[in-house]
Each structure stands twice: as C-alpha cells, then as structure tokens.
Amino acid sequence: MTAMHALRDLPDAPVDAVRRALTRGDRVRRVPRGSDGGGHKEWFHYCIYGDGFDLLVNYSLVDELHGTPPERGPGARRYEAARLTMLARERRWVGDVDRYPAHTVRAAAGSPEVRIGPNRMRWGGGVYHLRAALRDQPVEVDAVLRPVTMPSIVHNVAVRDGPPINWLVIPRLLASGTLRIDGREHRFADVPAYHDHNWGRFRWGRDFAWEWGFGLPKDVGNPWSFVFVRLSDRAHTRVMMQGVFLWKGAREQRVLRGSEITVTRHGQLRQDRVAKTPRAMALIAPGRAIDVPERLVIEADTGDTSFVATFESQEAAQVIIPNDDDLGVTIINEVAGRLRVRGCVRGEDFVVECPTIFEFLGA
Amino acid sequence: MDFGAFLADSLRLMEAEIPHLYGRLAATLGRRDVRVQVDGPAFHIRSDGNHVRIVDPGESPSVELTTTGRDILSLLDAESTLLASALADRLRLRGRADELVVFHDALMVYLGAAVRAPGFVGLRDRFRSEVEE
C-alpha cells in the first residue's frame, strides 16, 4: 500500500484540506523590520529518513538585536540574517551551519518561499521543494516533500522569561529526491519525512529548554504518527508544557497534555566524539558531556488511551548557538536513535517503531 | 594576510560591530601586553583597559603565545581543542598561572565576540585561504 493509497482510503480523503491548511498556515511569519519589538526568530525544519541515511535541514531567519554588519555601518543596531543548518548521517553525523548576510536572503512576510543564498525552500503545488548545499561540507540535497497528514498548529506556547513560541507541525510527509554526502549519492522515493515551523521572539539563553521528537513508521501502510514535545526550565526542574500528538492517517486522533503523560529520563548518553556545528563553536563549547538521556520514556494511561513510548539515543550532534544576552551558548542536541511506541487508542492497538531524531535543548 | 593583520582587522571589526564585547575584551585584558608569534614575526597585543591594539613587540609581556596558522585552522575546524593543542606543544603558552588565567578569560571573550560579529566569517575565510596557499 502506498501512503497516497492510505490517504485515499480515509473516508474524508483530505488531500485538498492538507493543501489549504498549509497554504494558509505555513508561510513566513516574520514582520517587516521595525514594526515589532525586534528579536524575531523563525525556522523551517525538515527531517528525511532514507535507506542508509538521516537528514536534517533547517532554514532559519534571525532578527539580530546585537551587532552591526559591515554593510549597514556603525549606526545600525539591528539587522536580519539567515542560517542554513544541515546535518546528515550515514554512520556518523556530518554537517554545518552556514550563515548568510541579509542581502542574500529572500523571505517576505507571508511568502511560502525562503531563499538563503543559493539555498531554497518553497511550498507550492501541494509539495515542499528543498534545495540546499553546505559551503564547506560535502552535503547537498534536492528533494520534494509531499505532506500526507494535516498539520497541527500550536500558538502562544508560554516560556518562562519571555514571549511565547508558536509551532506548526506536520508529522508525516513523503520525500523524493537526491542527497549527496561526500560524493556518495542517495536517490530516494517516497521515504518518510517530518516538518515543523517555529516562530516567536524568544531569546537564546533564557530560562527554557525543550525536548522534542517524533515517530513515523517506515511502513506507509501503518497509519499512526507520533509527536512529543516538552518545554521546561533550563534545569529541567519545572515543566511549562508537555504533550503527545497522535495522528491516525491524515487526521489528528488524540492529544494528551500536561499530567496525562509522564516523562522520565534514564541514564546519560556518552560518546567518544561529538560533532559540533558550526565547527568553530567547539572552541567555546569543548568537551564530550551531553545533556541527553540514554533512554527517554513517555507514558500515558488516561482511560481511552494508553501507550509506552521509548526513545533509545544512539548518537548526538550539537548545534551550538551563541546566547543573545550573555557570552554563554545554547546547545541543541540532535540525537539519532530509535523510537518504539506501543499503545491503544479507544480500543485500537497501535505500534510505531522507527529510526528518528529527537532534539534536546540545553545549556 | 598574516595573523597579526588578521587579528588587527578582527579587533577593528569587533569595535565597529559589537562594541560592548570589544569593551569587555579590553576590560578583561586590563593593562597588559601579550606576545604572539604565528609563523612569521612576533607582535604584541596591547590593551590599556579600554582599547586593544596590535603593536610591535615591546618589553615584558604578561603571556607569550606561539603557534602556527595551520594549528589555528585546526582549532577553528574543531580538529583539535585548546587543551589538546597545548598538551601536544602545538600551541605554546608561557606566563604566570594567574596571568594565563586572565589571558584565557580574554580569549573566551574574544571568541564569544568573534562568533557574534557578522563580518568575522569573511575575515576568517581570508586568513584560511592565505594559510592554505
């Protein structure tokens, strides 16, 4: 069974609804410079799982509050910049973060397209077109991603110590295209993919952290998709929001929030070597200590829904971001691993087992 | 572009692009000279607590640093760490322990400023192309 067949088998066959929802909802959210308080951040995030590779591509737009780029002169105090992050994994993570100056960026408010230098992301014709290549690392992708589930949009997620974050997620897409890693070519067709889009005016380094992940079965005949998110303080001692989103086919089937789920971290992931991007940030954040559990268990038993989800960490790569208001850094751990979910929703058993990437943000 | 020219340009860039961190760098260094030798002739980083300049070698540096352009690139490319380079004698630091601590603090401020200065990447790439020629 192909995923499109799975979609068509649903009684409401919402291909057009998916298209309409994304045309309306998944567009550049930043506002013209000067019309808000500044500090807007936004990114379009994609993960693709082929046979023999994982790929993460992130198009990020940043309204910087500090620093004056040379082209603006010493009087200017704000400017917009963009970053392309790509991490690819065959056996080990490789990748980089490439920063581009404002004059190379095309990302108008309300547009379905982002251009960052020669790299491009565009929503059109019911698909996402991605084209991206790193400057100094041999990683290059050209892909088309077709959503097969409805998105979920969560507005105004409160974080401590700052304005809220907004989040749009599509847990399941089918990706086709070509990935080149160090001269090796991976051609892929209809492989699982994930996309989310985040925006807000939060400040890196403030008192928040997140854990986030998803599961989408390689078997496209399996209709279940799984997304987990938890926002906490940086010390992980106070949870501000947590939730699990379950899709069956194209539709969101069940959302569990707050005390409906229990999350426990077990052990500590240890690695001999940690890939850090941008590479020069390893000078500021050296070392191999990783704030990532060996195993993360998410459980629910609410009466009509029960499940146990276990994420086993395999290898982390770190994206290291300078804090906005101090000389510290924020580390985003992108962790390849395996997810296994077994549960029951309203009398229907389900299983999701897949490779995935979980993200753990910390100090 | 030799390392002295690179460092001088990067300090000017920081002063223009992120003056608050440039000021913090100068304040962290205080009134000190650091003698630096990277491949070519030595020079001094001189701070008066408010400004940091590259000058010809003078008397009594607090700290002396000797390394090569290639070793600096290996640090920027995360192929080595400061500790590993120092232990392997690829980066030599000489000075009193308390002065080395101040130098390390200043180096962290400099690196923190470098990763926040938009123009730094272009400067680094110019330095890289000269070293790799």
Image: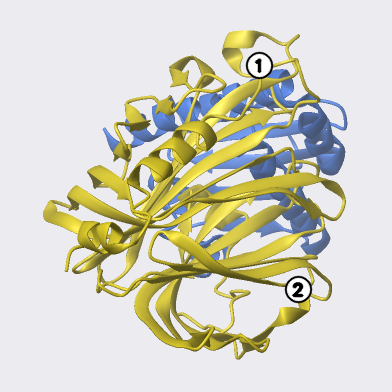
Chain colours: A yellow, B blue
Residue B89, percent from left and from top? 49, 64
Secondary structure of the residue carrying numbered label 2: helix
Badge 1 crowding class, 10 Å Cα cut-off, few under 14, some 14 to 19, many 20 or more, is few
Judge by depth and name the residue closer to the eye, A35 or A128: A128
Give the number of marks.
2
- Chain of the residue that carries numbered disc 2 in the rendered image: A
Judge by depth and name the residue closer to the eye, A108 or B24: A108
- Chain of the residue that carries numbered disc 1 in the rendered image: A
Of labels 2 and 1, earlier in sequence is 1
Q: Residue at x 58, y 66 (%)?
A: A212
Q: Nearer the viewer, mark 2 or mark 1?
A: 2
In the image, residue A152 sits, relative to residue B16, either above or below, namely below
Q: CA distance from mark 2 to mark 1?
A: 35 Å
Judge by depth and name the residue closer to the eye, A222 or A37: A222
Determine whether, in the image, residue A227 is placed left or right of residue A122. Answer: right
Judge by depth and name the residue closer to the eye, B121 or A194: A194
Residue flagged by tag 1: what amino acid is it?
Pro
Residue A237, picture quadrant: bottom right
Residue flagged by tag 2: what amino acid is it?
Gly
Badge 2 crowding class, 10 Å Cα cut-off, few under 14, some 14 to 19, many 20 or more, is few
In the image, residue A184 sits, relative to residue A235, either above or below, namely above
Numbered circle sitting on residue A32? 1
Numbered circle sitting on residue A258? 2
Residue B62 seen by the camera: yes
Secondary structure of the residue carrying numbered label 1: loop
Q: Residue at x 51, y 32 (%)?
A: A24
Q: Are marks 2 and 1 on the same chain?
A: yes
